[in-house]
Image: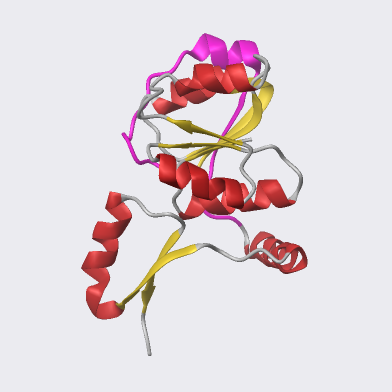
Amino acid sequence: MLVQGTGGVSIFGLQIASALGARVLVTSSSDAKLERVKALGAGEGINYARTSEWEKEVLKLTAHAGVDHILEVAGGKSLAQSIAAIKPGGQIAVIGILANFSSDFPIFSLLLKQVILRGISVGPRRALEDMTRKFEQLQLHPVIDTVYPFGDALAAYDHLYRGAFGKIVIRVTG
C-alpha cells in the first residue's frame, strides 16, 4: 500500500494497513516525518521533494509490480503518478484534494491496468461503527499533532495548511 503524506488521513491509513499486515510505503517532503512513520509501521519512505517522479521509486521498491492500494490525497498530477505506481487490478482511493481540483491522467493506462478508481467522502454509519470496533480490537488510536482551543481555530487551520503529522484538533469546549 502507498499513502501520500503524513496528514491525519494518511497516518490513519498507514496505521490501519500496518496493523492488518500490509507493507506500507509513505511519501512526504520531510525526511524527519519519514523517519517518524517508520515507528508507526511504514516499510519505506519516499521524499517527493527530492524524488519528484516518486512513482518510479514505488515501482523500484516493489520489483516493478506496483502497489495494491493507494490512498490518494493530493490530486492534480499526483493522480497520473498513482496510476503509474499501482499494480494491475489495484485500487486508488481518492480521498483528498491538496494540489488541484482537476487532473490529467492517461486513460489508456487506467484501462490497461484495470485500475479501480474510487472517490471517497463519507460512508454509512454502520461502516463507521464497524471500523470503530475494529480500531478497538487492534488498539489503534489517531496520532494527534496539536490540539488548539476554539479561539485559536485560525492558527489550527494555518498549521493544517503548513503540514501536520497526524490530526490537528480544535477543542470546542473545556
Tell me if residue 111 comes above or below residue 101 in the rendering. above
Which quadrant would residue 29 be assigned to in this image?
Answer: top left
Give the position of the N terminus as an image quadrant.
top right
Tell me if residue 129 comes above or below residue 86 in the rendering. below
Instruction: Give the extent of the magenta segment.
Output: 96-123
- In screen coordinates, is 65 left or right of 149? right
Which quadrant would residue 28 be assigned to in this image?
Answer: top left
Q: Is residue 114 magenta?
A: yes
Q: How many marks?
A: 0
Which quadrant would residue 151 be assigned to in this image?
Answer: bottom left
> Chief secondary structure of the magenta span?
loop
Is residue 10 visible in this depiction of the protein?
no
- In screen coordinates, is 89 left or right of 98? right
- In screen coordinates, is 33 left or right of 141? left
Residue 16 x %, y %: 66, 52
Residue at horizontal 38%, vertical 90%? 174
- In screen coordinates, is 98 left or right of 83? left
Residue 72 x %, y %: 49, 36
Tell me if residue 156 comes above or below residue 115 in the rendering. below
Compare residues 47 and 123 and report the one nearer the observer: 47
Compare residues 57 and 113 and report the one nearer the observer: 57
Residue at horizontal 64%, vertical 21%? 66
